[in-house]
Image: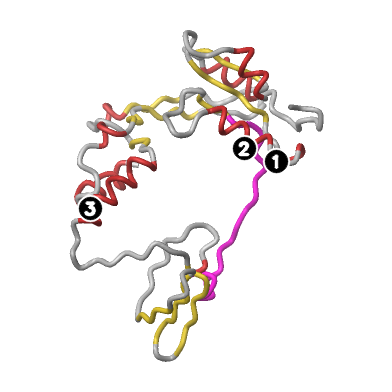
Amino acid sequence: MLPSVDYLASAGLLSDPAAIGHALTQIRIIDATRRLIRAPETLFDSAEFGQPAFGWNLPNLKLAESFEAARAGLGNLSTIETTLDDLELTPDGLVLKLGNGDTLRAGLVVGADGKKSRVRESAGVRARENGFTQAALVCDLELPSPLSGYDVVRQILALPPERRPRLVAIGDDDTVDIEQARAAGFDDCLIRPISLSRLLGTLAQAGPRSAATN
């Protein structure tokens, strides 16, 4: 969202979000309940708040390139490309055992190592998790290289049948082959422009997939 993008810009990590990402200019709130009387749909536009966007959809590959360029310019920063195997808290500080066999000692460790954080686990910081079953996955067939929508569907189809969500492909009329998309494993294929009612109607069909789905 915008505060995060502003921080990246102020830190010199992102010069122009529009150059690498897509602006989130509108936020739509929909009452998706099945009540007889539902709240009306509400659409917020960033221009109403004097902002160019509420946030930006930034590809990780481009962000990584920007971060790497900033890192290369810091002469006092050392980088080790490896993994953390173990972290021990001792009275004299922290001992890090790395995947390359090295051992480091530090007075402070910042754990930015994701959901299954080894740093957080070693520090005894517990996280509460709520599991949700994914009912549907909407996939753009024209995702930028090196990842394509067909790469995504192959990964999903490798899951056990009971864990596979309903797969919905979207794309442009002049580039998407609907028969190819269905043969690849998609349950539905929607062609842009896609109305909100059409998308919601397709997602409403999401349910348990049969073991024969392919």
Q: Residue at x 28, y 67 (%)?
A: 78
Label 1 crowd (10 A; few <14 / some 14-19 / many >=20) = few
Q: Residue furthest right?
A: 211
Question: Magenta segment, principal secondary structure?
Answer: loop
Q: Is residue 208 left or right of residue 42?
A: right
Q: Is residue 72 left or right of residue 161?
A: left
Q: Position of residue 116 (x, y in %)?
A: 55, 61
Query: Mark 1 to mark 2: distance in Å?
Result: 7 Å
Q: Which mark is residue 155?
A: 2
Mark 3 → mark 2, Cα distance in angstroms:
33 Å
Camera-side residue of 115 and 35: 115
Three-letter amino acid code of the residue under disc 1? Leu
Q: Earlier in the sequence, mark 3 or mark 1?
A: 3
Q: What residue did someone put label 3 on?
A: 70
Mark 3 or mark 2: whose residue is earlier in sequence = 3
Quadrant of the image occupied by residue 57: top left
Q: The residue tagged with tag 1: helix, strand or loop?
A: loop
User: Which residues make up the magenta segment?
Assistant: 119-137
Residue 71 in the image, given as x and y percentages of width and height: 25, 56
Mark 2 secondary-structure assignment: helix
Question: Picture coordinates of residue 91 (x, y %)?
Answer: 43, 91
**Pointer 3 with pointer 2, Cβ within 8 A:** no
Residue 52 vertical placement versus 87 (above, below): above
At label 2, counting other C-alpha atoms closer than 10 Å, the crowd grade (few under 14, some 14-19, many 20 or more) is: few
Q: Tell me whether circle 1 and circle 2 mark residues in contact (CB < 8 Å).
A: yes
Disc 1 designates what residue? Answer: 159
Of 121 and 198, which appears nearest the observer? 121
Residue type beneath disc 3: Ala
Residue 165 horizontal/vertical position (percent): 67, 34
